[in-house]
């Protein structure tokens, strides 16, 4: 297993080419077991709009992620994409294989670009297959600047597939005038949510408080 990944950086400020950084990056069709690892301190300095920072990324196969701690995943560029192409994510799992994601801690997923862009960050993004997310902890997803309206902070995002989410904790707080979601479900199939705990906090400009 990978015991400890810390302080890796892509120093190139690529302006036109795609540039990824990931603690674990998988495209194989087999079974991927990632358990009890620490992945931290990843930085992507690329300036292109198609670059990304991931703690764990897999586009294929069956994924079993248990007991990992993923934090300080950082992005400084100009990515304004959504879905699985977001600027920064702790965990991104794609493809038709089943995904078992339990007891992981994901926090301090950071965008450090201070320009006013429609950027997105997420703790966990999953799409495809039949999936269990149990007892994961997602916290502290941040923006350094003042992003455009339409930017998003998302704790757990679900694409197409079948999902059961149980006993997860998502705690997000920010003082920005942007969309913030603990669980964002874009799925047209079955999603079951049981015994999850959600906290959303912070303060925003009075002009966006429609209750005042």
Image (cartoon, rainbow, N blue to C red):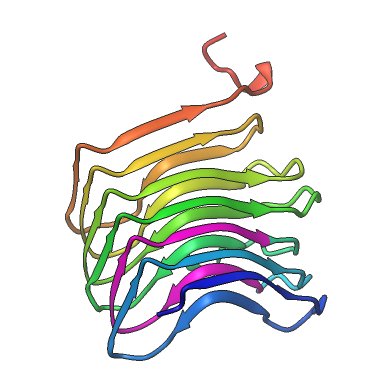
Q: Which residue is drawn at 40% across and 51% down?
A: 156
Residue 91, visible in the rendered structure: yes
Q: Give the range drawn in magenta.
A: 51-74
Quarter of the image holding residue 182? top left
In the image, taking residue 57 as reference, residue 116 lies left or right, namely right
Number of labels in the image equals 0
Q: x and y percent of residue 41 in the render?
A: 64, 63
Q: x and y percent of residue 207 in the render?
A: 67, 19
Quarter that holds the N terminus: bottom left
Q: Please tell me whether residue 124 belongs to the stretch shown in magenta.
A: no
Q: Residue at x 22, y 73 (%)?
A: 98
Q: In this view, does 5 lie above or below 144?
A: below
Q: x and y percent of residue 69 in the render?
A: 45, 58
Q: Is residue 74 above or below residue 54?
A: above
Quarter that holds the C terminus: top right
Q: Residue at x 46, y 30 (%)?
A: 200
């Amino acid at each position: 297993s990978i015991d400890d990944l810390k302080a890796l950086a892509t120093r190139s400020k690529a302006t036109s080419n795609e540039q990824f950084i990931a603690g674990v990056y998988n495209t194989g069709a087999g079974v991927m077991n990632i358990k009890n690892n620490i992945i931290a301190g990843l930085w992507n300095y690329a300036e292109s709009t198609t670059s990304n920072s991931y703690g764990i990324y897999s586009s294929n196969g069956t994924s079993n992620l248990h007991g990992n701690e993923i934090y300080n995943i950082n992005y400084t560029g100009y990515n304004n994409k959504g879905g699985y192409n977001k600027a920064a994510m702790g965990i991104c799992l794609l493809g038709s294989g089943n995904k078992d994601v339990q007891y992981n801690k994901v926090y301090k997923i950071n965008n450090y670009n201070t320009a006013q862009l429609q950027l997105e960050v997420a703790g966990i993004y999953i799409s495809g297959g039949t999936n269990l997310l149990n007892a994961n902890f997602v916290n502290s997803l941040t923006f350094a600047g003042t992003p455009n309206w339409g930017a998003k902070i998302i704790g757990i995002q679900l694409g197409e597939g079948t999902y059961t989410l149980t006993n997860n904790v998502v705690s997000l707080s920010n003082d920005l005038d942007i969309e913030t979601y603990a669980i964002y479900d874009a799925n047209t199939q079955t999603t079951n949510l049981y015994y999850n705990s959600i906290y959303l906090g912070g303060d925003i400009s009075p002009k966006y408080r429609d209750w005042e």
